[in-house]
Image: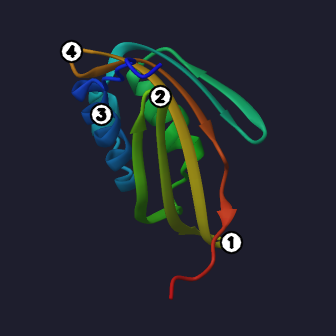
Amino acid sequence: MDDLEVVLSPAARNAGHRFAAALAAKDGATPRAIPDAEADFGGRTPNRVWEARTAAAVADDVILGKWFEPGDGTERVEAVETGPAGDRCRLQGTDAEGRFAVEQHAFSGVADNKITWLRMMCSGFRPAAARP
């Protein structure tokens, strides 16, 4: 295994980072522009399985329409990590119940610097301790 080389695609890393930043900013235009027009999306939150087949549905109907509601505010992106097995994003914010932390793991395919398929596992909103 010493000769195994792991190469991460810069396109995958850039698309993933842009997607995470857009998600945190609740910028609906960017997620619609990043996934392919006929993206293949599957997601899982603690109580539901989600599917969508267009970029608009991924952005508007699932992630920004249901996962993050209008009253939910992201305060900061704590980490975006890209690895050979997938990407991970941790966010902190506030909602009607107080401060939350959320972590998402994503697996995706990228072509021409656009996400063509995306699988996400979301932790759901978890209570977060106040920052010192």
- Judged from this view, the residue extending furthest toward the front is 2
Q: Is residue 117 above or below residue 45?
A: above
Crowding near the residue tagged with mark 1, few <14, some 14–19, many ≥20 C-alpha atoms within 10 Å:
few
What secondary structure is marked by label 1?
Answer: loop
Q: Amino acid at mark 4?
A: Asp
Depth-wise, is mark 2 or mark 3 nearer the camera? 3
Residue 80 image point, x, y percent: 40, 49
Three-letter amino acid code at disc 2?
Val
Q: Which mark is residue 97?
A: 1
Measured Cα–Cα span from mark 4 to mark 3: 12 Å
Question: Could you give the CA–CA distance between mark 1 and mark 2, rounded to whole angstroms?
Answer: 25 Å
Query: Mark 4 = which residue?
Result: 112
Mark 4 vs 3, N-terminal side: 3
Under tag 2, what secondary structure? Answer: helix
Give the spatial CA distance, label 4 vs label 2. Answer: 19 Å
> Mark 1 vs mark 4: which is more N-terminal?
1
- Residue 43, by quadrant, is top right
Q: Which residue is mark 2?
A: 58
Label 2 or label 3, whichever comes before in sequence order: 3
Closest to the camera, between mark 3 and mark 1, is: 3
The spot of residue 119 in percent (x, y) is: 54, 24
Q: Earlier in the sequence, mark 1 or mark 2?
A: 2
Q: CA distance from mark 1 to mark 4?
A: 40 Å
Disc 2 from disc 3: Cα separation:
19 Å
